[in-house]
Image: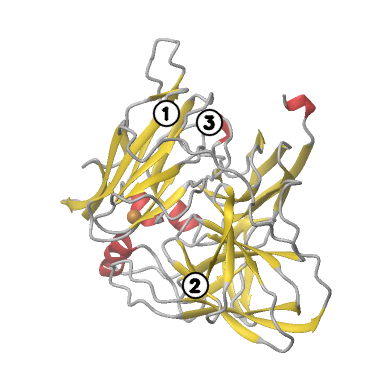
C-alpha cells in the first residue's frame, strides 16, 4: 500500500537550547529543531510520514506518535524500540490513516523531557474537513520555574507532592509562549486545534462566556458540532473547535476555568492568551450540520472482556504507588486481532486520571451506567474519582506490544501503566520479550 502513497519527509533534531518563553524570560529547553513546541508536522490522510529524529540531548530519547494508528514497531515506546542514544538517529516511517489533530512527544524520561519542551503537533488533513476561514494550533503547556528561570527541582516534600499531584507550574504557555496575543479578523470563523501537552494540568477552555462549537477530538471530527461555552481538555487530549465570528474591536481572554481534579492544587481561573479582533474580512466558512458518521462499535450492554482498575496505594519505597489492577508497571494479558474489546475502566482512587490507550481509538459506550452525550473516537479519556467507564475498541491487524497508562506523567512514571500484546489469534501465542524497560 505504501508504494501508492505520497511520502512526506521531515528531519528533527532533539537538543538543548535557550528558549524565550516571554521577553526577558529564557529557559534552557530541550526540544525539537530548537523550538517549543517542535515543528508542526503536516500530512494528508493516507500519506506516508517519514521523520528522521537525531538525538543531540545529553540522554536517550524516544518519540511517541500520540493517537496515530501506526504499526507497533513505530509507536515510539521503550516496549518496541531501543531509545535513541545521544549522537544517534532513528527513522520513523508510517502511514497516517486518519485525519485529525495528533501530536508527538518524548516517551523517555517523560517527566523531565516533556516538561522541558520535547513535544510538537502532527496535523493530518483530509478533503472532507470542513472549510473555515483560517486554522490555528494552540498547544497548551505549563512550566514550573524558579524566579531565575530554571526548572524547579523540589525538596523531598515537593517531590512527594509532585508524584501525587503531577507537576504543574505557573508559567502558562500557548505554543511555547507566555501571554500571547492572537489577532483575528471580525466576521470570520476559524478552526482552533487545542492539544494539551502539559504534564498534569487540566485545561477547562473558556472564551469569556462566548459560545463555540466542538467539531473534533482525539480521533478526528465528531458527527455533529456541539455548541458549548466551556470544554475540558485533559493532558494528552485534543479538542478542535470552530471559534467566531466575533465583532471588530472585541478583545477577550483564552482562559482555563477552575477545575478540581482532587489534588492539593487550589483550582484557579487562569489566562493563557488574549484574542484581539481586528477589521472585518469576508467569510467563506461553512460548517455542515453533519460532519461525518461514526459507526457504533458496541451496544451499551456489550459484555465486558477486561477490567482495568486505576488506584493509588501505599508504598514502602515511595510513600505512594499508582496502580493498575493493584500493581505497578503491569504486564497485562494479550488481546487477539479482530476480537472486539470491551473494557471496564474503573477509577477507584479519589483523584482524576486521564486514561490513554496507545495506537487504537476507542469509543466510550457507558459512563457510570449512562450512555455518553455524543459518540467520538478517543485515545485519551478523563475518569473522575469513583468513575466507571466502558470503552469499546477493535484490535485491527497490527500485532505487537502496546500500552495504556494515565497521561499525568508523574502517575505514569509511578506505575499507573500496563503493556500488553496484540496477537494474531490464528497462530500459537509465544510471549515475546520487551526490547527495553519502560521504567524510569
Ligand atoms: Cu493519573
Q: Report the Cα–Cα distance between label 2 and label 1.
A: 48 Å
Residue 390 occupies quadrant? top left
Query: Closer to the observer: label 3 or label 2?
Result: 3
Ligand 1, seen in the image, is in the quarter at bottom left
Label 1: element kind: loop
Pointer 1: what residue? 340
- Residue 283, given in percent of the width and then of the height, sits at 80, 70
Residue 339 occupies quadrant? top left
Q: Earlier in the sequence, mark 3 or mark 2?
A: 3
Pointer 2: what residue? 150
147 to the left or right of 43 = left
Label 3: element kind: helix
Residue 13's place in the image compared with 295, above or below, is below
Residue 158's place in the image compared with 336, above or below, is below
Q: Earlier in the sequence, mark 3 or mark 1?
A: 3
Pointer 3: what residue? 72
Residue 94's place in the image compared with 195, above or below, is above
10 Å crowding of disc 2: few (<14), some (14-19), many (20+): some
Amino acid at each position: 500500500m505504501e508504494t501508492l502513497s505520497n511520502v512526506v519527509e521531515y528531519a528533527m533534531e532533539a537538543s538543548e537550547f535557550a528558549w524565550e518563553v516571554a521577553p526577558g524570560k529564557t529557559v534552557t529547553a530541550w526540544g525539537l529543531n530548537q523550538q517549543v513546541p517542535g515543528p508542526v508536522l503536516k500530512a494528508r490522510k493516507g500519506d506516508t510520514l517519514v521523520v528522521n529524529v537525531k538525538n543531540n540531548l545529553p540522554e536517550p530519547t524516544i518519540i511517541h506518535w500520540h493517537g496515530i494508528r501506526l504499526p507497533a514497531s513505530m509507536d515510539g515506546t521503550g516496549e518496541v524500540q531501543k531509545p535513541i542514544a545521544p549522537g544517534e538517529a532513528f527513522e520513523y516511517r508510517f502511514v497516517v490513516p486518519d485525519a485529525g489533530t495528533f501530536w508527538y512527544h518524548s516517551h523517555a524520561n517523560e517527566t523531565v523531557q516533556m516538561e522541558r519542551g520535547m513535544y510538537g503537533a502532527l496535523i493530518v488533513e483530509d478533503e472532507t474537513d470542513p472549510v473555515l476561514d483560517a486554522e490555528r494550533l494552540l498547544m497548551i503547556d505549563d512550566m514550573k520555574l524558579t524566579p531565575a528561570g530554571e526548572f524547579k527541582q523540589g525538596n523531598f516534600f515537593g517531590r512527594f507532592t509532585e508524584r501525587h499531584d503531577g507537576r504543574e507550574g505557573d508559567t502558562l504557555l500557548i505554543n511555547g509562549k507566555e501571554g500571547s496575543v492572537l489577532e483575528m479578523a471580525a466576521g470570520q470563523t476559524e478552526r482552533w486545534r487545542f492539544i494539551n501537552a502539559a504534564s498534569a494540568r487540566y485545561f477547562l477552555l473558556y472564551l469569556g462566556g462566548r459560545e463555540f462549537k466542538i467539531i473534533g477530538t482525539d480521533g478526528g471530527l465528531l458527527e455533529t458540532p456541539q455548541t458549548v461555552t466551556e470544554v475540558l481538555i485533559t493532558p494528552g487530549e485534543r479538542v478542535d473547535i470552530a471559534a467566531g465570528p466575533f465583532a471588530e474591536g472585541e478583545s477577550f481572554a483564552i482562559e482555563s476555568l477552575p477545575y478540581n481534579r482532587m489534588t492539593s492544587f487550589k483550582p484557579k481561573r487562569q489566562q493563557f492568551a488574549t484574542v484581539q479582533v481586528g477589521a472585518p474580512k469576508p467569510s467563506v466558512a461553512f460548517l455542515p450540520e453533519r460532519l461525518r458518521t461514526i459507526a457504533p462499535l458496541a451496544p451499551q450492554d456489550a459484555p465486558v472482556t477486561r477490567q482495568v482498575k486505576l488506584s493509588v496505594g501505599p508504598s514502602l519505597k515511595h510513600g505512594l504507588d499508582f496502580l493498575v489492577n493493584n500493581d505497578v508497571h503491569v504486564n497485562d494479558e494479550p488481546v487477539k486481532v479482530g476480537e472486539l474489546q470491551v473494557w471496564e475502566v474503573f477509577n477507584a482512587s479519589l483523584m482524576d486520571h486521564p486514561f490513554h490507550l496507545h495506537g487504537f481509538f476507542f469509543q466510550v459506550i457507558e459512563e457510570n451506567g449512562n450512555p455518553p452525550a455524543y459518540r467520538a473516537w478517543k485515545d485519551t479519556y478523563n475518569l473522575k474519582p469513583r468513575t466507571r467507564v466502558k470503552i469499546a475498541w477493535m484490535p485491527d491487524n497490527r500485532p505487537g506490544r502496546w500500552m495504556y497508562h494515565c497521561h499525568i506523567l508523574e502517575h505514569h512514571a509511578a506505575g499507573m501503566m500496563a503493556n500488553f500484546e496484540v496477537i494474531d489469534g490464528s497462530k500459537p501465542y509465544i510471549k515475546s520479550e520487551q526490547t527495553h524497560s519502560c521504567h524510569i
